[in-house]
Image (cartoon, rainbow, N blue to C red):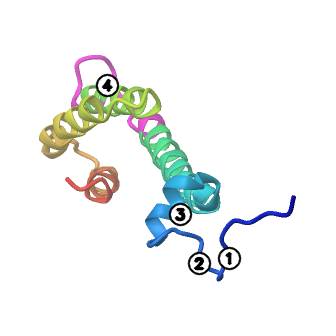
Amino acid sequence: MPFSGPVSSGNSGFSTKSAWQSACPEINMTQRSEETGTTQSRRNRDVANLEQLVRDLAGEYGTPNALMREHLDAARFYLLGSMPAEYEFSLKLAADSLPDIEDKELQARVAGFLRSQGL
């Protein structure tokens, strides 16, 4: 017996693009992959910047540089651990410690990183 259903007129039955996307999530995979890649590359860049700043903050225990190093190292840990509230808090603590850094060039680099993070 031949098929007697409706003949397709080219209309899929989906009225909006979002209806297609929810019914066929693979359509958005490329866009999601690009967004994820952008997020990961930004996180990787931020981790690398934090690691460099931590290395450059030489100083003995109890010095302003050591305190800044602790704040930035904690921020790195929280960034890698996907803990955004803790990451932001560590960066705010670092911002509060910024005036105590004696090396003005290093202070400017830390300030630049903090600004790039929205602080």
Compute the Cα span from label 2 to label 1: 7 Å
Asked whether the residues under the numbered discs 1 and 3 touch, taking CB atoms below 8 Å apart as contact, a structural biologist would say no
Q: Nearer the viewer, mark 4 or mark 3?
A: 3
Residue 44 image offset from top left, x and y in percent:
54, 46
**Mark 3 = which residue?**
20
Residues in magenta?
Answer: 54-65
* Residue farthest front in this picture: 1
Compute the Cα span from label 2 to label 4: 60 Å
* Residue farthest top in this picture: 61
Q: Say whether residue 34 is left or right of residue 16.
A: right
Compute the Cα span from label 4 to label 3: 49 Å
**Element type at mark 4:** helix
Q: Say which label, 1 or 3, has the lower sequence index.
A: 1
- Residue at position x 24%, y 33% in the image: 85
Residue 67 image offset from top left, x and y in percent:
25, 26
**Mark 4 = which residue?**
70
Asked whether the residues under the numbered discs 2 and 1 touch, taking CB atoms below 8 Å apart as contact, a structural biologist would say yes
Question: Which image quarter: residue 73?
Answer: top left
Q: Say which label, 4 or 3, has the lower sequence index.
A: 3
**Mark 2 = which residue?**
11
- Residue at position x 52%, y 60% in the image: 21
Identify residue type, mark 3: Trp
Identify residue type, mark 2: Asn
Q: Nearer the viewer, mark 4 or mark 1?
A: 1
